[in-house]
Amino acid sequence: MTVELDESTGDAVADRVVSGVVGVFERAFPGRVHGYLLRGSYASGANIDGSDLDLCIVFQEEFADPAEAERARGAAASCAQLSSLPLEALVVSEAQLQRPDNLVLALQLRLTSRPVYGGDVRGKLPALETDTYVRSVVYTPLHSYLYPKQRAGGSLHYPLEHIDPEGEFFGFDQWRMPGPDGQDVPSTKLLVATVGWTATALIALTVGRYVRDKRACVALYRQHLDDDWLPLVADVHELCRDRWRYQLPEAGAERRQLRELCERTLGFQNHYLRRYREYQLAEAKSDDPERRELALHRLEQIQL
């Protein structure tokens, strides 16, 4: 099934990939998908070699049943395996986007995504409300903190230790990306995600500002925090993303530079966890019982 997109991604190869994904879902789930939204750097036009092609596939209302949701996720995973670009195809329903635990995603779609096929759901999504946004986004860095297998189990032990103390990059090279020959290779993507989401959450905690993308994150951090961690935030963006294109550098001097960034990131994570815990302790005293319950649950996830 050949599909002509309503709006181009701005890249011919990405257009072919997205068109293929749309074709698969329109055939496999006729009449069920409300729209296809482009997220991330392809949506803003800031994509580079190695950037993920982030596509959100929004099903109408709620999934018919758990089996439909599972089939949709399986189809998305298969599309990602076949894609010639690093594809992150996220499947979600309209109902899920209205839930508090999906607020960060809903805001991202409302404020920074671009519809490329089908209906435009952005106007139906929750609007930005600072307190609610802060409560949601402060948890986001923990997704990358909890990702490695060494920290599996749903809780963190503070202070954190390196994922892999003996590794050249302390375990921050665990997320893989397609290499020049198509085979997956280690990358700096876990490092970029960890530092970026940590900086984003600190901006929210400090001034309540919404961060649109990676470049805006560095600018807002410089504008509003400008603390001892700013060089790390800026260097990870400028080196890992802009210069090395998420790949591990080959030159010895650059590998030593990357190792230093990874080493410094552990301190940044522990700095954030201290701020995060202070915030949750304050939330635990809220007059709102739901906020208190959420804060207590999140405090239990950090073992002192």
Image (cartoon, grey):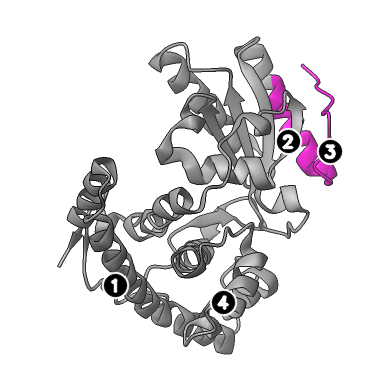
Residue 165 pos. (x, y %): 29, 76
Q: CA distance from mark 1 to mark 4?
A: 19 Å
Q: CA distance from mark 3 to mark 1?
A: 43 Å
Q: Nearer the viewer, residue 112 or 89?
A: 112
Residues in magenta, as a range:
1-23
Give the label, 4 or 2, closer to the camera.
Answer: 4
Disc 1 marks a residue whose amino acid type is Arg
Extreme residue in the left direction? 304
Q: Are marks 4 and 2 in contact (CB under 8 Å)?
A: no
First in sequence, mark 3 or 2: give its number: 3
User: Per the image, is 11 magenta?
Assistant: yes
Disc 4 marks a residue whose amino acid type is His
First in sequence, mark 4 or 3: give its number: 3
First in sequence, mark 4 or 2: give its number: 2
Residue 182 pos. (x, y %): 63, 50
Identity of the residue drawn at 34% across and 57% down = 148
Give the label, 3 or 1, closer to the camera.
Answer: 1
Q: Is residue 69 left or right of residue 171?
A: right
Q: Nearer the viewer, residue 134 or 18?
A: 134
In this view, 139 is above or below 233: above
First in sequence, mark 3 or 1: give its number: 3
Tell me the SS state at disc 4: helix
Tell me the SS state at disc 2: helix
The residue that disc 2 covers is: 17
The residue that disc 1 covers is: 274
Give the label, 1 or 4, closer to the camera.
Answer: 4
Disc 2 marks a residue whose amino acid type is Val
The residue that disc 3 covers is: 8
